[in-house]
Image (cartoon, rainbow, N blue to C red):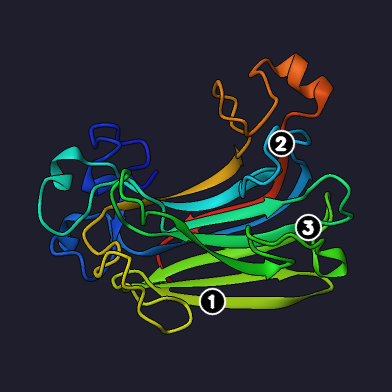
């Protein structure tokens, strides 16, 4: 966390989060933007689901930018404070496929009950989360190392993905507007993107296998011994992880 060991600064306080340059109170935040860089291997993904058509089935999120949830901010004009995610980096491998896909999603910054609140998915290696074809040689195998670098400079998200034997992929997204990676306006998104939110980086192993009753997303139980035996778990190994101010 940006506060380091100074726990007098609250987890959700501006002093523990970063903002975009366009944030009206940007000078109150710990920093403007920053970077998150990692090298990792996905060694296992959940193998069973009652709903294989669910886009997040058989996947794990390994890196994120998360906006803070603020109920008071939700009541103000601008459409901020919903706690959405402008970035989620996924690895997904379906049973029977030799390799998996790496892709990243941008979540429209809208209220939870808004039917237009959804993820816009972008393929890196293999397909995005809408793909139905096997990624084959274009994909990343379990146990195969890959890296990502996430950097927010000013209002712009810069992404770089690299892996030996695969093309390096780069993307840019203005997080303070509703302009997509393709340069086109997404009229269904918040016109100011995430310009009014405080944000933080996350890296880890975030299983997208949903064990909530009746979710239909996963056959996992939440009991480690049982789920390990049945393959209902994810495992991610990070060999390097670094975060800091923009460079």
- Left/right of residue 92 with respect to residue 54 in the rendered view: right
* Residue designated by label 2: 234
165 relative to 246 in the view: left or right:
right
Q: Secondary structure at mark 1?
A: strand
| Mark number displayed over residue 145 | 3
Question: Where residue 47 sits: x, y (%)?
Answer: 78, 36
Residue at position x 72%, y 34% from top?
49
Residue 86 occupies which quadrant of the picture? bottom left
Mark 1–mark 3 Cα distance, whole angstroms, equals 20 Å
The answer to which quarter of the image holds residue 178 is bottom left
Residue located at (70% from left, 25% from top): 219
Q: Is residue 29 above or below residue 22?
A: above
Which class describes the residues within 10 Å of circle 2: few (<14), some (14-19), or many (20+)? many
Q: Which residue is mark 1?
A: 171
45 or 64, which lies in front? 45
Residue pictured at 67% horizontal, 37% vertical: 51
Above-or-below relation of 9 to 145: above
Task: Measure how far apart labels 2 and 1 are at the Cα level.
Answer: 27 Å
């Amino acid at each position: 966390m940006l506060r380091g060991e100074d726990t007098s600064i609250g987890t959700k306080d501006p002093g523990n989060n970063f903002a975009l340059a366009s944030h009206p109170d940007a000078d109150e935040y710990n920093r403007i933007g920053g970077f998150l860089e990692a090298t990792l291997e996905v060694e296992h993904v959940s193998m069973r689901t009652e709903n294989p058509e669910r886009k997040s089935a058989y996947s794990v999120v390994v890196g994120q930018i998360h906006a803070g949830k603020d109920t008071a901010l939700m009541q103000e004009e601008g459409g901020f404070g919903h706690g959405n995610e402008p970035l989620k980096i996924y690895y997904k491998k379906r049973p029977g496929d030799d390799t998996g896909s790496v892709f990243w999603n941008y979540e429209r910054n809208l209220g939870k009950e808004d039917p237009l609140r959804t993820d816009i998915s972008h393929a890196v290696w293999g397909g995005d989360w809408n793909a139905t074809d096997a990624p084959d040689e274009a994909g990343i195998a379990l146990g195969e190392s890959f890296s990502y670098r996430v950097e927010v400079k000013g209002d712009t998200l810069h992404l770089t993905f690299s892996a030996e034997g695969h093309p390096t992929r780069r993307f840019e997204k203005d997080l303070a507007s509703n302009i997509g990676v393709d340069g086109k306006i997404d009229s269904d998104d918040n016109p100011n993107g995430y310009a009014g939110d405080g944000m933080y980086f996350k890296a880890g192993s975030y299983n997208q296998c949903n064990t909530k009753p009746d979710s239909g997303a996963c056959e996992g139980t939440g009991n480690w011994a049982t789920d390990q035996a049945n393959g209902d778990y994810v495992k991610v190994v990070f060999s390097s992880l670094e975060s800091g101010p923009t460079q």
